[in-house]
Image (spheres, rainbow, N blue to C red):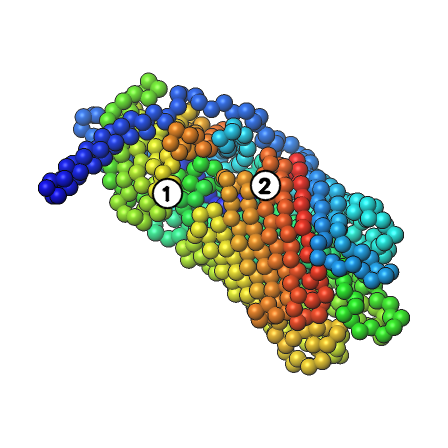
Amino acid sequence: MKIFRLAIATLWLMSAVVYGADESFDDLMGGFDEEVSVVLEVPQQVPALQSRYQLSGAYTFSSSFNYAHDAPMAGNTDYRGLSRAKNKLDLQLDIRINEHWKARIEGRAFYDLAYQINGRSDYSDDVLDSYESEAEIVEAWVQGSVSEKLDFKLGRQIIVWGKSDNIRITDIINPLDSREPGMTDIEDLRLPVFTSRFDYYPGGAWNLSALIVHESRIPKEAAQGSDFLPLNVFPFPEGFIFPEDETPEQNLDNTQYGLALNGVFQGWDLSLYAADVLDSRWHFEESNSVRRYGRVQMLGAAVNFTAGSWLFKTELAALNGLQYNTTQNKKSRWDFLIGTEYMGFKETSISLEIANRHINDYEVQMINPADFVNKNELQTALRVTRSFNHDTIDVTWLISLFGSGGDDGGFQRLWANYDISDGLMASVGVVDYIGGDNPVMEALSDNDRLFAEVKYSF
Amino acid sequence: MNMKVSKTLMSGLILGLLSVSWQVQAITADEIAHQVDVRDTGDNSKFDMKMTLIDKRGHQRQRTMLNFSKKRGGDDLKLLFFKTPADVRNTGFLTFDYDDDRDDDQWLYLPALKKTKRIASSDKSGSFMGSDFSYSDMTSRNIEDYKYKLVKEQEVGGHKVWVMESVPKTKKTVDETGYKKSWMFVRQDNFVVIRALHLTSEGSKKKYMDVKKLEQIDGIWVATEIEMKTMKGKERLHTTVLSLSNIKFNQDLSESYFSIRTLEKGL
């Protein structure tokens, strides 16, 4: 009887499956619409590419709110609360000179209302100069083909070396905007420099790129009095005036050079680099009365290769001529990075990079102010990005840590970008500065902020 | 916007083939699949593409792109530049889609970073640039990976079609494409797939591909407007419309044009 009931049940189930399948097929086919079912409401937005001039740009309003600061001591700036209400305008003009040559000029200006709102008198002149407003030419270049195998680009430009995305090893040509570490938009991070660039393509997989950098441009550092320059961790003598950093003279003696040999192959890429450029780190000179940027020489290599959904990358740089504050001897350093990126999860990318900077002939006093460096400086960066709702929302978590296990501090940032409509994007996020054994990072650890941004691109 | 790299874009978009007379009674499902596979899709091509993304509330977003394509033996070389929206303008993709089992070579140029980045093969069942098309939809499929069955004949838009059922032979193919079963509507006069229905392996969603406009350009049949909509039950979740224009074949595109040099110099 039990077997009989089971047989009946099985027959019923089978018939149901068959019936369901037949019905399902007709239902499924009914899902097709009539011949024309979609009326496109969005007008054609294709710019006239044939036009010789194209103006584009973006207006951005960004704000941030510091939520972790303690009340300041008397006479010090109160960095609690609103720390940014910045209006920024980028304008870019592209000019098609002829079939082989084109030019670009890009300008950027911003004004941050936060200082007016909070009271300008609460801030140092350096802070106001650096953070309240700015207008500058970003990129300005002319580019074209001299011959079938030779390209030339002259002007203020950005040159990106290396294969890594989150940690710089061989990417040393452009100085950085480090005024708000962890907060700077990635497109604003590198500062263009006036350069003559020659790219030779002999055919096949290789390309040789030669750079002559005419502009001695120094990084944009956090201003004195800002919450990103914790001078209190430096044991300066009383009355010590922290000097301005000095831009090297713009002359032929200060010309910088770079050479890159790039190979592109099936499944992997290789780049070899040589450079003699300005160091990105300042050091005191003349009895601590001036801060200067020295020259460094680099030989480097970068390789990446893919295996299925994995991208592996590695970089190696041998640097020479590094100057420090706690020793008169110039140092050499080995910088090494390994990293991977996984794209196998749906709508998700995961990137991990680990780098070590090893100072040769390290001297124990280099751990002291104003260097604060270890013989080996480990850095780890992990980035996870996931897209939702047909790429309408991207959520990213980035954590960057110094020292083994993050002992020396770092930061983590979580943010979401939302495409409100074409060209209009809103972002919200939080950045958490992580303290640690490094006194500078520890001093920055109460700079945590919430931030929001609306950007309209046109 | 999450920037992911196209697989073989052209081969999936341009569903063209030479007109062939055929004895309907004699043809099998495998033969139809073969004829679809060997159809002429043109070479050395250049075209504009407009991708309109429509959510279930009718809110539309649009991307426009310029595409270049060339065959190198059995390999497909692809170059794509975004023209709009403004925040991704001049973003470029370069793809070498190999005829054999080798992974594709893919590079992405990000103008905001001024950087070219090699890209690993992503999950092929994932969304292509936020659209209802998956990466596998944009890739020419290996017809050997499927079992075909001729289901019926009917008319669509006044044209006789074969309705073919295709089922992946292996779980690997299911995982790669994200589809556990498909039906294709193949026009009998020109072997163009003018409709397809895919059942997804996850989430019990259905995806309807519908060719809204089919044109013959330089003797090659080209689907110039394709709709892909994603349904769950009776609910339309999302729709994508791809429109192709300014289609030109037999352009003077050298192999060296499909290079990082071109990618970085941009349009």
Query: The numbered mark 2 sits on a residue in which chain?
Result: A
Would you identify the image quadrant in which residue B235 lies?
top left
Q: Which residue is at a point 55% across and 59% down the rendered structure image? A: A382
Q: Nearer the viewer, residue B264 or A224?
A: A224
Q: Quadrant of the C terminus of chain A?
A: top right
Q: Which residue is at a point 55% across and 42% down the rendered structure image? A: A393
B140 relative to A253 in the view: left or right: left
Query: The numbered mark 1 sits on a residue in which chain?
Result: B
On the image, the x and y values in percent for residue B33 come to 27, 35
On the image, the x and y values in percent for residue B12 come to 40, 37
On the image, the x and y values in percent for residue B147 come to 24, 40
Element assignment for label 1: loop
A83 relative to A385 in the view: left or right: right
* Residue A274, visible in the rendered structure: no
Q: Quadrant of the N terminus of chain A?
A: top left
Q: Which mark is residue B202?
A: 1
Q: Which residue is at a point 61% across and 70% down the rendered structure image? A: A407
Q: Amino acid at mark 2?
A: Tyr
Would you identify the image quadrant in which residue A96 lies?
top right
Examine the rendered structure and indicate whether residue A421 appears above or below residue B2.
Answer: above
Disc 2 target residue: A418
A221 relative to A313 in the view: left or right: right
Q: Nearer the viewer, residue B220 or B152?
A: B152
